[in-house]
Amino acid sequence: MADVQVWVWRGDTSGGDFMPYKVAADEGMVVLDVVHRIQAEKAPDLAVRWNCKAGKCGSCSAEINGHPKLMCMTRMNEFPAGEHITISPVKTFPVVKDLVTDVSFNYEKAKTIPAFKPKPKDPDGKRRMYQEDIDRVQEFHKCIECFLCQDVCHVIRDHDENKRSFSGPRFFVRLAALEMHPLDTNDRIDLIRAKHGLGFCNITKCCTEVCPEDIHITDNAIIPLKERVVSAHYDPLAWALRRIRRTRPALQAPSEPQSKVPPSA
Amino acid sequence: MADFERHEYDVVVIGAGGAGLRAAIEAHALGAKTAIVCKSLLGKAHTVMAEGGIAAALGNVWPEDNWQVHFRDTMRGGKLLNNWRMAQLHAQEAADRVLELEEWGALFDRTKDGLILQRDFGGHRYARLAHVGDRTGLEMIRTLQNTAVAKNIDVFMECTLRHLLTDGDRVSGAIGYWRPSGKLIAFAAKAVVLATGGVGKAWRVTSNSWEYTGDGIAMALEAGADLIDMEMTQFHPTGMVWPPSVRGLLVTEGVRGDGGTLRNKSGERFMFRYIPEFFRADTADTEKEADAWYEDKRNNRRTPDLLPRDEVARAINSEVKAGRGTEHGGVFLDIATRRPAEYIRRRLPSMYHQFKELADVDITKQQMEIGPTLHYIMGGIRVDPDTEAATVPGLYAAGEVAAGMHGANRLGGNSLSDLLVFGRRAGEAAAAYSKRASPPKVDEAQLDAYAQQMEAPFQKVGDENPYAIHSELQDMMQELVGIIRRRDELEEALVRLERLRVRAARARVTGSRVYNPGWHLALDLNNLIGVSEAVTRSALVREESRGGHTREDFPKTDAEWGTKNVVVRRRDGRLVLTTEPIAKVPAEMRALLGEDKPTGEAATGAKTVVAAGDD
């Protein structure tokens, strides 16, 4: 079979450049296969993260011709013959070496999210939840933490200074999953507004477009959270009740009514 | 004295898959100062790839199910070579561990009554696997990861530990390096929990990721611990076979659990021809009964498509050898003609996605092409069943790296539950040990010697490409230590392993120490080759066929061998093998198993077919 040629960004914190590599092609090859072949045959120290090679772990995020993608799920036959193919590290996070970036921003943000706190069990000691009540949250749990949504989000992609006060789409998905969890009792609404910077997001939906798990980040996570923040903070009656009772306002999923767990059968 | 980063902990957990995270959560909860050290980013460990579910006798779908039946299924699936006490603890505690995940925020698929839904899997009498579509491992690892983070447990990510430190006969810590910087790091620890998984990357066709290089097994062996059952390797029957890029990638057993069936190239459901005597009474012998079983388990026996994995993998191997396989050396797995498209997409979303994106196959309309793939090793570090203590004081092991629980063959779904049950027990025991143990003494000379070993590839001018050595190892193990084994080939494998070991010592490393995969692989080769030798030597010793170990020259299951483990130790730099009696099952537990013993002849068919197809 013919050869394939790609330009891989090689470098480290002091800078770098695209280097051309040519290797043999195989049927069904993905970009990550090409990178592995380059490692094995031409550049043994080429740095790349990967694990499952099946789109399940979210390790091999990169920018292919400038588009944030998983290398393991990008087939070489997507590119017309002769197309100039570049592979570069994700832009939002600082480069460590070659295709590997320092993604510790995400792990630091994760530490600031108050944990799941379930309400008491049913009187018979069981937990009952209905499938239709958890479908939406299960959608959020599909997140593989590839951080491509973080990479593409212009709030932090082009503005490093925003990172301090903005957690990014991945964590809005995480916060929405907790807030919409039928059993959770923790209240994170103040934090979502003040600490995680939900207000920075102007719903351009770039994050939704790059999500390899097809999570509707903007429509199903971010917009409902924004509605919730608004009703909690800018509705004076809700605000007063909140102050007094510290209760959770009901959170409506955008398209379907969310029934709460019924009393035990 | 070597100058590098040092830390001191009560308990150091190596590995951050299900077992490691669960162990760390437990040790931390009991007040031990605990660290998690893992090779990849947190949340990327192999557990994330587990698809089908967690086996636990919750009894939500079939109230007849209970721990006794789960115990029986596990022991019979393991061809009675299991450590009975581990199988008992596992069956008794798995349900609590699953419910605990729910307390930590996991959201399993639900029954109509709002309880955790359970699905069918191979070797399990009842629908038993708690699951989330076909991404159960992701739910489990994220739940454990979030819990560990919320508890503020220290995590050292992308940090590879290579050697255990010892103080006399006890373990006193570990040494390795940060992958991003290449700088060395040492931990002094009262107790170390190994939760490093298996060694799949020694084979060419595997479902395992780069991390599976046998690190924990090699480290334990070096520190003087016993290994058992190393010949017991699991070839999962259904890995992808085409295109070459995805060969070996896992296709969940849930496809068959949800109604999929295996067919050869003429469309025949060939599994009916491969029902072994040991499972005949539990297995349907007509297509009608097999299909009815999915809906009515009281009046029908299980489909042979869901025989334990070793049986199905050997059957596929034989079909292909007999010329009844597909173009690319596999067989067909069909769910398209058996279940509605909507059902398939809902139950098996990641399989649908995986075949569509990577193989241009729509599994709601077309058959999948599949074949065996090295998936798991039942053997590993010998542990005490209750505490997961290895035979070296201060050392604990849980999950795939430990042995005994699964005997000669692991049932699907029993891995995730194993991680939780024995991860928790290992964390608990390690924390308790750390309370009574004296502070660890670090032997500076040992530290220096290990530091030099790790840095050596940079200091010499090698002439061997580590990637090429690894690739040859994978081809060799696939060809000579595959599904079907025989003496002359195993002996040839030992000769070749020795040659690879000599070449690995001359591995060439270029570039800096910053995130250098060539260097990492050069060091991984020692573990891969060392553990491959333990597998090969154990396979030579066991002169019978049982579970994940099939000998063409000893095709029968031998009752005498059913009473013994093959034990591997390292003494004076060499592997020493012995056989030792397995713990006898007490009468009241034996009564749960049924009286019959695994007998008969394994369908050896031929050599490892998937490799023979195109390599």
Image: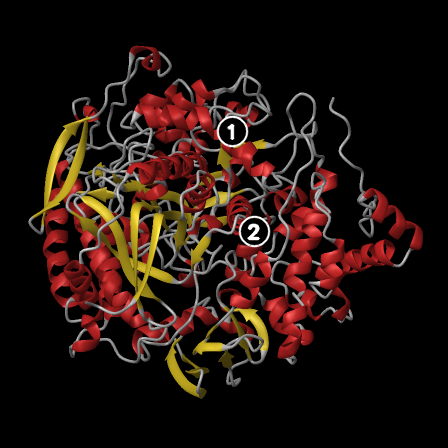
First-in-chain label (1 vs 2): 1
How far from the left and from the top, in percent, is residue A192?
Answer: 73, 59
- The CA span between labels 1 and 2 is 28 Å
Residue B96 shows which numbered tag? Answer: 1
| Quarter of the image with the C terminus of chain B in it | bottom left
How far from the left and from the top, in percent, is residue B374?
Answer: 33, 48
- The 10 Å Cα crowd at callout 2, few under 14, some 14 to 19, many 20 or more, is many
Q: Which residue is mark 2?
A: B350
Q: Amino acid at mark 2?
A: Ser
Q: How many marks?
A: 2
In the figure, B583 relative to B340: above or below? Answer: above
Q: What residue do we see at 81% from left, 48% from top? A: A251
Q: Chain of mark 2?
A: B
Q: Residue B612: which quarter of the image?
A: bottom left
Q: What residue do we see at 58% from left, 73% from top? A: A68
| Quarter of the image with the N terminus of chain B in it | bottom left
In the figure, B547 relative to B181: above or below? Answer: above
Q: What residue do we see at 22% from left, 27% from top? A: B557
How far from the left and from the top, in percent, is residue B211?
Answer: 36, 57
In the figure, B531 relative to B430: above or below? Answer: below
Q: Is residue B22 visible?
A: yes
